[in-house]
Amino acid sequence: MSETKSISSKPPGAARGLGLHGLLTLLSLGMIAPFVWMVLTSLKSLPEVGDAAWLPKHFLWGNYPEVFSVIPFLRFMANSVVIAGWVTLLQVFTSALAAFSFSRLQWPGRDRVFFLYLGTMMLPGLVMVIPNFQLMVRFGLVDSYLGLVLPAAFGAFGTFLLRQFMLGIPRSLDEAAEIDGAGKWRIFWDVVLPLSRPGLVTLAIFTFMGNFQSFFWPLVMMKTVDKFPLPVGLLFFDFEHGQATHLLMAAVTMSVVPLIVIFAVLQKQLIRGIQVGGVKG
Amino acid sequence: MKHRERTIRRWFTGMGFLLPSLLGFCAFTLVPLALSFAMAFTDWDIMRHNQFRHEPLHFTGLENFIRLFGDPQFWRDLGNTLFLMLGLPFAMAGSLAAALLLTRVSHRRSALRPALVIATLVLVASGLVLLWGGMAELGVWCLFGTLTASVLLAGVLTGGTLYRTLFYLPSFTSGVATYVLWKKLYNPHSGPINFGLTPLLDRLAAAVRTSPGVFTYGLPVLCAGLAVGLVAWDVRRLRSRWSGSEAGLAAVVVGAVTLAVPLGLLLHWQGFSLLVTGSVVAVGAGVCIVTTVRRPRPWGRVRSAGEGAGIEIALALLLLPVLLMLAAGIQVGPALPALAANGLEPPDWLGSYGWAKPALMMMALWAAIGSNNMILYLAGLGSISPELYEAADMDGASPSQRFWHITWPQLAPVTFFIAVMGIINGMQGGFEVARSMTAGGPAGATTTLSYYIFSEGFETGRLGYASAIAWVLFALVFIFSLLNFRFGNRDAND
């Protein structure tokens, strides 16, 4: 309350407040205008797509089912969810273990290994992409889900984030558990992990969203259309049937709406995550 | 002996927890990293070295890198990458402005009543029109009326949270889906952007035809005036603050380089005359150096050389595109009447060499204003101590003084962090957008370095050369990472 007051010293006049709300409303509308056009166009018929009018003459809800007959949209969506889900699961689990080791255990060489992790965080992913692909060719993992999941599932960033988080949990708690006879695993599983929940949630959300949208790696890895994750599938749709703007927009709408729902539900955790240190991208 | 045993046991416990992560880290980060480095010095070409053909692989030393520096496509793509990054200052200014607006609105309830009344009226009116007129001509206005009213209503009721949500949506949904959407928006024949622009341009063409003098001389004069004004504003700041260089020489150099190098390259590539290029760079560098030297201030003073450098980078980045646009205005003005003679056509956007990059930048701006940067600015604004503002109020500071003397310097660590991260991401970026919207075209106008690596590594299959480009890119990024590490504020980093 006080900080709001202090940033603008003038008394909050009704006219100024209204102007502010009006301005923000207009800006918000500008932000969502592309989405409005997207939804309206997805309900048009093909000849109407080239019209200047935004509104379709009749709402053709049938465009949506038609998308499924043109491309395996649900398959794409399922691929994306499964791939991102596995990456998230592995990423959170291995990162939590590693972070526990880096933040709670004393062992020789620990800090050197951690600096190695830190150092690679600065590396552009592009440096690793080419040899990684050659490795995948050698292992015969090209065009497989495993080849998509594995390289994305281990990252220095997650370890770093969770380590920062675990450093903030008071050590006296695990000392107390140790006196009660708990082993390291018990301390990790019953003490540190439950207390790191906000950090885990943040990492999970960012990992899932990042991999749900990831494009470069699936694009080079996947050859079979049925195995495409959504972003690659959408691009494929655009290349193959790009003229069918109404269907394309229906597909885009169906890709964007789940994101909007996820965002609406998880908004608080997301914003806290960004502020706490999930500063990525 | 007992001690040693315990140490070994501790090592095994620690390693045990680390192992799953370490295995993956080695397999997918360290090994590829070493491989990539080695590959950069070979002539590995997928056409000659693959499962079916085993020609011997040669270590070629620095040949890839030497070839790279003579490769016009590398320089073009580096230029494209830098050009696209010029959108960053606009995005940062937009994020900051949005954050400032949002901070002002939160918790203020006195605006409730009139806003509610107006929103309800609009809702009722559009409802009535919808009932009487059906979905015909007025339908879209009703739709927008209803939307506006709902946003306003919800915005007032939630105390600004709704606006923040809507601002954040483009960035959150950003991906291939929104790129495909924007490709349709930019369509020159059926996209809404050109449908909206055509009547505006018709009106502008008519205005140019009736009074060409205003545009031939007026526009350049106005732009030149604004540029001079910008410089004068900084000279005034200098005169009121001159006293030793607290921000340090590093800041001067960093700021000047940030401003001058890209600007010079850019103007050169866009085919501006050497005179214009030289003078704009000179003015820019002058402004930059002038802004750098400042003396301690009573409130919100610069605390360290690092912070000074951060402010300078941000300011230089902000001034750069503004000066550039003014330079463009000076050049465009005299040419306008000839262009308008046959009526002005809206641009071909993604299909035209000159407009493809600005089109991508505008889309990026849409996604970037409400992004994480805005959230970081919001957090930064929230953590400024109110006492600073109270002190300023007692000194009778004007709103602009409050901003430039308190808000801006206090936000400097956040600004610095956003700028550096933006540069780091920008250097590596551009592939997804270009791949899904323009395929790098037209004529390579939107091919960035990351796209070049992709096409060398996965299309032509020159793996050695692609790795060399990747490592040069890494070197460029590394400079900025170091900058962040050296000057960045730990609070903003960790």
Image (cartoon, coloured by chain):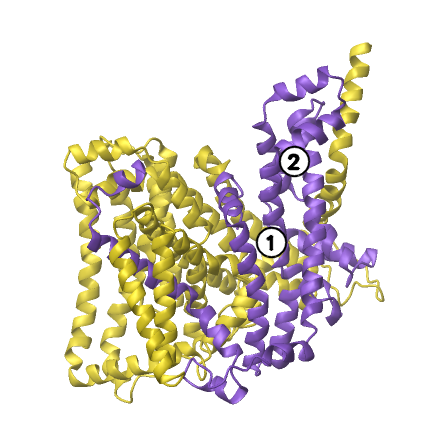
Which quadrant is home to the N terminus of chain A? Answer: top left
Nearest the camera: A108 or B456?
A108
Whether pointer 2 and pointer 1 mark residues with C-beta atoms closer than 8 Å, the reply is: no
The answer to whether B298 is drawn above or below residue B219 in the figure is above
Residue B462 appears in the picture as rendered: no
Asked where in the image residue A4 lies, by quadrant, the reply is top left
Chain colored purple: A
Q: Which residue is mark 2?
A: A116
Q: Subunit of mark 1? A: A
Q: Which residue is mark 1?
A: A210
Q: CA distance from mark 2 to mark 1?
A: 23 Å
From the image, state the color of chain B. yellow
**Which comes before the other along the chain, label 2 or label 1?**
2
Q: Position of residue A15 (x, y in %)?
A: 20, 55
The single residue placed furthest to the top in the displayed view is B1
Q: Up-down: is A16 above or below A201? A: below
